[in-house]
Amino acid sequence: MVHRAADYPGHWEHFSHMADVGIRGVGATVDEAFAQAAVALTAAITEPSKVRYDDSVQLDFASTDLETLLFEWLNALIYEMAVRKMLFGHFQVHIDDCHLQAQVWGERVNRFRHQPAVEVKGATYTELRVANDDGVWVAQCIIDV
C-alpha cells in the first residue's frame, strides 16, 4: 500500500517507554516533523494549547546528520525552557542540509494555568530516528523525565 504525505496531516504523539516518555513528530516535510516533535515535547509537560505566544526565541545551528540535529534541537528547546523559565507552544522550523533555523513562541511558566506534569531533563539517543517513510517524515526519540 502506498502512503502519501497528504494522507497524513502533521501531528505529534507520545509512545510508551518504561519510566521515560517517547515523543514523535509526523509531517509532510522534515521541517514539520521537527516542529511536531517539539509540540510533543511541550505536551509531555503541559497541554500545548494552554501556552500563549507572548515572546519568541530564535535558534540557529547545524549538525552532522538529521538524527543528531533532532537530538540537539530538542535539547536546545529544553535548555531555553529552563534558562528562560518558559514553555513553547508554536514552532516554525526550516532545515536545509542539516542546518536548522527556527523561531519558537511561548511564555513564562504559569504553574497555576500550565500545571506542569513533569520536568524534562533531556532528549536521549534512545529510539532516536528521523526518516522519510513512504513520503511521510517521522522524527522521534525518548526524553528523560
Image (cartoon, grey):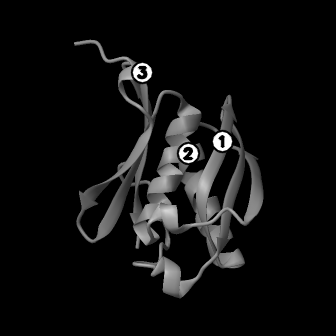
Disc 3 marks a residue whose amino acid type is: Ala
> Which residue, given by chain and number where applicable, does mark 2 sit on?
35
In the picture shown, does residue 29 fall above or below 64? above
Disc 1 marks a residue whose amino acid type is: Val
In the picture shown, does residue 46 fall above or below 133? below
Q: Residues within 10 Å of mark 1 (few under 14, many from 20)?
A: many
Q: Position of residue 122 (x, y in %)?
A: 50, 67
On residue 93, the disc is 1
In the picture shown, does residue 145 fall above or below 131? below
Q: Residues within 10 Å of mark 3 (few under 14, many from 20)?
A: few
What's the residue at 62%, 61% (across, down)? 77
On residue 6, the disc is 3
The one of 107 and 34 positioned closer to us in this rendering? 107
What's the residue at 35%, 50% (across, down)? 13
Q: Look at the numbered disc 2 and give the secondary structure of its residue.
A: helix
Disc 2 marks a residue whose amino acid type is: Ala
Q: Is residue 81 left or right of residue 115?
A: right
Q: Please say whether residue 124 is visible from this viewpoint.
A: no
Q: Is residue 89 left or right of residue 55?
A: left
